[in-house]
Image (tube, rainbow, N blue to C red):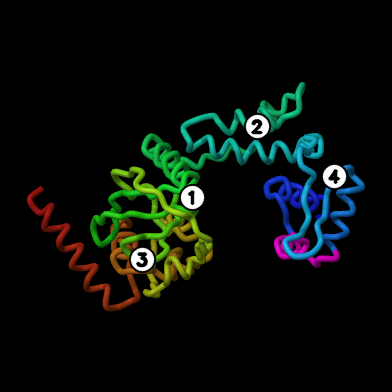
Amino acid sequence: MKIARLIGILSLLLQQEQLTAAQLAEHFEVSPRTIYRDIEALCQAGIPLTTAQGRGGGLAIMSGYKIDRTLLSTADMQAILAGLRSLDSCSGTNRYQQLMAKLAPEGTSLLAADQSFLINLASWDKAALAPKLELLHSAIAEGRQAAFIYCGPGGETERLIEPYKLLFQWAGWYVWGWCSLRLDWRLFKLSRMLDLHLAGCFEPLPAPAPDLRTEKVFPPVLQVRALFQPQCKWRLLDDYGPDSFEPLPDGRLLFRFGFTDKESLLGWLLTFGGDVELLEPAELRQELWRLAADICQIYSEI
C-alpha cells in the first residue's frame, strides 16, 4: 500500500542522513519513478525534504525536523506496541514499554488498550536469557568481541566471535557473527552459551545476512518414514506441522520428513516409546533396536 510505503520512506530518511532514489526503489521493490512520486507526496504533506544532485547526492530530511506522531494511526501505534512488549518479555526490563510511552500522543490510553496480542519471546529459563541478550546487544553496539564456551553435538569448545545480529528464529534466540575458531560466519544459540563475557574491540565491517533457509541450516540428509499411533498426532503437529504426516485407514499416521543427522532422529523417536515404528532408513532400525536394548539393560534390575 502506498501509505505504508510513504511511512517506510519517512522512517528510513529519519534514520539515515541521506539515501538515493535508487536505494529506496530497491528497498521497497518499486521503480525510481514511483519513489519520486512518493517524495512529491511527502513534500505536499509538509515534510521538508532536500535533494542534492551529482556524485554523493541523494534525498534527505531537513536538519532539525521532528516527525509529527499523529502521522501514525492508533492501529499503527498498537502494532508497534505489541512488538515492543515482546522485546520486554525477554529483556528483563520495561525499557521498550517506556519508549512507547514517549511515542504515544499525550492524553491517550493507548498503552492500556488492545491486549489481543501477547507475545512472549523468552525461553523457559528467562533468568539466564536476559543477561545474555543485554551483554550481546552491548557488544554489537560497542564493537566488542564476545567470548564463551559453546555446547554442541561435538562437545564443548571455546569461542571468540565478532557479533553483528541478534535474531529470534526456530523458537529460540541466536547471535550471528564472525567466529575466530572456524574463520567463518556462524549462528550460535544463546541457550548453549556458557561463561559469556565481553572481550577485545573490533572494527565492524559490512556483514552478510544469515541464510536462514531451513534446507541450508538443517539440510535433510536422512529421509525418514515412520508409523505413529493416533495419540501421537499432537506431537507431530507441534514438532513438524500438518504436512509431515498423513492418516492411514487404520488410524495410524504415516510420517515423512528429512532429518539432519541420525542422533537427532533416534533421540526424537525414542521419546515416543512403543508408539512409533521406524520404516526408513532401514539400516537405522537395527541401531534403534540396540539403543532400546541398552535402555532395557540399565533398568533390568528394577
User: Image check: 221 left or right of 154?
Assistant: right
Please tell me which of labels 1 and 4 falls first in the chain. Answer: 4
Q: CA distance from mark 2 to mark 3?
A: 40 Å
For the residues carrying marks 2 and 3, which lies nearer the camera in this image? 3
Please tell me which of labels 1 and 3 falls first in the chain. Answer: 1
Q: CA distance from mark 1 to mark 4?
A: 34 Å
Label at residue 100: 2
Please tell me which of labels 4 and 2 falls first in the chain. Answer: 4
Label at residue 183: 3
- Whether the magenta-drawn stretch holds residue 134 is answered as no
Few, some or many C-alpha atoms within 10 Å of disc 1 (few <14, some 14-19, many ≥20)? some
Vertical order, 166 against 289 (above or below): above
For the residues carrying marks 4 and 2, which lies nearer the camera in this image? 4
Label 3, secondary structure: give it: loop
**Residue 119 in picture, x, y percent from top left:** 56, 40
Contact between labelled residues 4 and 3, with CB atoms less than 8 Å apart: no
User: Image check: 83 left or right of 266?
Assistant: right
The region drawn magenta spans: 20-33
Vertical order, 289 against 179 (above or below): below
Q: To which residue does mark 4 refer?
A: 48
Contact between labelled residues 3 and 1, with CB atoms less than 8 Å apart: no
Label 2, secondary structure: give it: helix
Q: Amino acid at mark 2?
A: Met
Q: To which residue does mark 1 refer?
A: 166
- Say which quarter of the image contains residue 65: top right
Of residues 45 and 141, the one drawn nearer to the viewer in this rendering: 141
